[in-house]
Image (cartoon, rainbow, N blue to C red):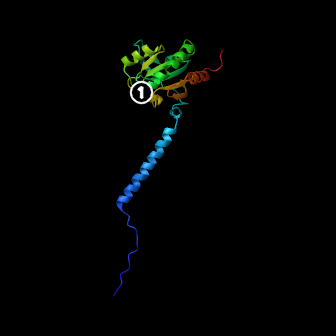
Amino acid sequence: MRLQPRALAHPRFDGGVALRVTVILAMAALVTVLALAFRRDPSDIRTGTVGKPAAAFDLELLDGGGRVSLEQLKGKVVVINFWASWCIPCKQENPTLVRVWERYRGSDVMLIGIVYQDSRDAALEYTRRLGNTWPSGLDDNGRTAFAYGVFGIPETFFIGRDRVIAGRHIGPIDDETLINGIESLRGPGP
C-alpha cells in the first residue's frame, strides 16, 4: 500500500475574508483622513494664491451703478471680501466689515465685496438691510472666485499696493484680524 503524501495544513484563504479585510482597511483609512481634516482650522487652509499677483477682475456693480475693477484701485491697499446673502458666517462678520469700512473710508484702503453664487435681488436686499456701503461686484460666472481660489465663503483677501496677495482669511473675520491685515500693508504713515 502506497501512502499518499499528506497535504500540508494550510488555512484556506477565502475570497470573502479578503473582501472584509479590504473594506475594514478602507474604512479605517477614511476615518483617519476625516479625523485629521476636521481637526484643522479652516482659516489655516493654505492657498496657492498668497504671494502671487492678484487676479484682475472687472465686475458689474451690484447696485447697477457701473463697474469695479482691480485696475481702478492702483496705489491702494485692497481688501476683497467674497460673500453671499444666504451665508450665515457672512452675516456674522458684517458688523466688522461695516466698522472697518467706516474707519478707512476715503483713505488709501479700499474694501470691495464680491457677490458669490447669489442673485442680484437677494444681495441687494442683504446690503440694504445690513448697511453695507462699500462697492460690491457681481461674479455671475464665478470666474473671479475661481481665480482667487475661493474655498468657501466668507473669504477675505489682502492685496498690497504692488498687486500681490499678501494674505487670506477663511471664515468670518474679526476687527483685529482685519485691521492688522490692512495696517501691515499700509506701511508707515506720511
Q: Amino acid type of disc 1?
A: Arg
| Near-viewer residue (68 or 89) | 89
Callout 1 environment at 10 Å: few (<14), some (14 to 19), or many (20+)? few
Q: Is residue 1 above or below residue 188?
A: below
Task: Please report the residue visible at 40 percent of the width from the left and 18 percent of the height from the top.
Answer: 123
**Residue 120 placement (x, y as % from top left):** 37, 18
Task: Please report the residue visible at 50 percent of the width from the left and 33 percent of the height from the top.
Answer: 42
Q: Which residue is mark 1?
A: 143
Left or right: residue 18 versus residue 167 is: left
**Residue 110 placement (x, y as % from top left):** 53, 17
Q: Of helix, strand and loop, which one carries label 1?
A: helix
Q: Quadrant of the N terminus?
A: bottom left
**Residue 66 placement (x, y as % from top left):** 42, 13
| Near-viewer residue (51 or 107) | 107
Residue furthest bottom as drawn: 1
Total numbered circles = 1
Task: Please report the residue visible at 43 percent of the width from the left and 29 percent of the height from the top.
Answer: 146
